[in-house]
Image (cartoon, rainbow, N blue to C red):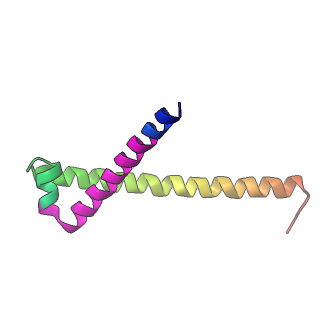
Amino acid sequence: MIALCNIAFIVLWLTKFIAVIRVLIKEEYPRLYVVLFLCGRSDKMSLETVKRARDVKKESIIESIEAVMQFMSNMKSMYANNVFY
């Protein structure tokens, strides 16, 4: 069981590491990125850029929703404890 958890962790870590390396290579060496990850097809670069922009926007929306949920939770606990401003 422990070995299975360790293998799962290593696989997860490797996928995240490769994703970070892809972003770094894409920003610093776009030609190398096209050759290594897009099989030389530079037309896919614009599609990946659009997809990445969409993902970043989703992440920011999720962060703002989490902030609102945290605020509401704090307000609920203050109301339950009769703590007012």
Q: Is residue 83 above or below residue 35?
A: below
Q: Main secondary structure of the magenta part?
A: helix
Quadrant for residue 85, please give it. Answer: bottom right
Image coordinates of residue 35 in percent, x first then y, are: 10, 53
In the picture as drawn, the residue positioned furthest to the top comes out as 1
How many callouts does the rendering have?
0
Image coordinates of residue 10 in percent, x first then y, are: 41, 44
48 or 11: nearer the eye?
11
Image coordinates of residue 69 in percent, x first then y, are: 65, 52
In the rendered image, residue 27 lying in the magenta stretch gets the answer yes
**Span of residues in magenta:** 9-31
85 or 51: nearer the eye?
51
In the picture as drawn, the residue positioned furthest to the left comes out as 40
Locate residue 85 relative to residue 2 in the image: left or right. right
Locate residue 34 relative to residue 25 in the image: left or right. left
Q: What residue is rendered at 67% in x and 55% in y?
A: 70
